[in-house]
Amino acid sequence: MKTRKWVCKSACGECCGCVLISRSSWKKYQSRAARVDRVVECDKDILPVTTDGMCCFLNDVRECSIYRDRPPICRIYGRSSKIPCPYIRPDGSPRSYHETLEIKERINCEVDAGIAMVRGLKQ
Ligand code: SF4
Ligand code: SF4
């Protein structure tokens, strides 16, 4: 089956919560980070925790400021059925409105858990 080129919704960033980033990338791109409240050391990686729970590299127009060098998890998000994008199918085709609603409902509790974890890290 032929797959389409994956193109995110313009200015979306909905899946861009706080992510682990390698120490080398952090050193390189730290100056682009915004809204950082705390930096958590996680073995070989860094977790920049933000004031709003979104990724520190998501800029004001909801685009990734390190897109070409984004972490591996950001590259596979949506392309695997285990971490589905609400808007685009793994083959790159757009989802129906009902699929979007169903997936959003399914991942809502995971997002809530992630936000709770990030809030916990800030304390
Ligand atoms: S993967 Fe999906 S939810 Fe994430 S930014 Fe792209 S379109 Fe939005
Ligand atoms: S690094 Fe970029 S693609 Fe990954 S979560 Fe942050 S803003 Fe989104």
Image (cartoon, rainbow, N blue to C red):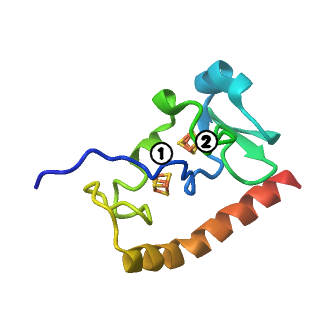
Question: Residue 41: where, in percent of width, then height?
Answer: 73, 37
Indicate the quadrant containing the N terminus: top left, top right, bottom left or bottom right. Answer: bottom left
Q: Amino acid at mark 1?
A: Ile
Residue 36 picture quarter: top right
Question: Residue 109: where, in percent of width, then height?
Answer: 60, 75
Ligand 2 within 8 A of label 1's CB?
A: yes
Q: Which mark is residue 53?
A: none
Indicate the quadrant containing the C terminus: top left, top right, bottom left or bottom right. Answer: bottom right
Asked if residue 31 is positioned above or below residue 113 in the image, the reply reads above
Q: Which mark is residue 73?
A: 1
Residue 53 picture quarter: bottom right
Q: Residue at x 25, y 56 (%)?
A: 91
Q: Callout 2: 10 Å neighbours few (<14), some, many (20+)?
A: many
Structural distance between the alpha carbons of marks 2 and 1: 9 Å
Q: Label 1's element? A: helix
Question: Residue 119: where, in percent of width, then height?
Answer: 80, 59
Asked if residue 83 is positioned above or below residue 49 in the image, the reply reads below
Front residue (pair 59, 39): 59
Q: As drawn, which residue projects farthest toward the left?
A: 1
Front residue (pair 95, 69): 95
Tell me how many marks there are: 2
Q: Residue at x 34, y 68 (%)?
A: 95
Residue 59 picture quarter: top right
Question: Residue 27: where, in percent of width, then height?
Answer: 67, 20
Q: Which mark is residue 20?
A: 2
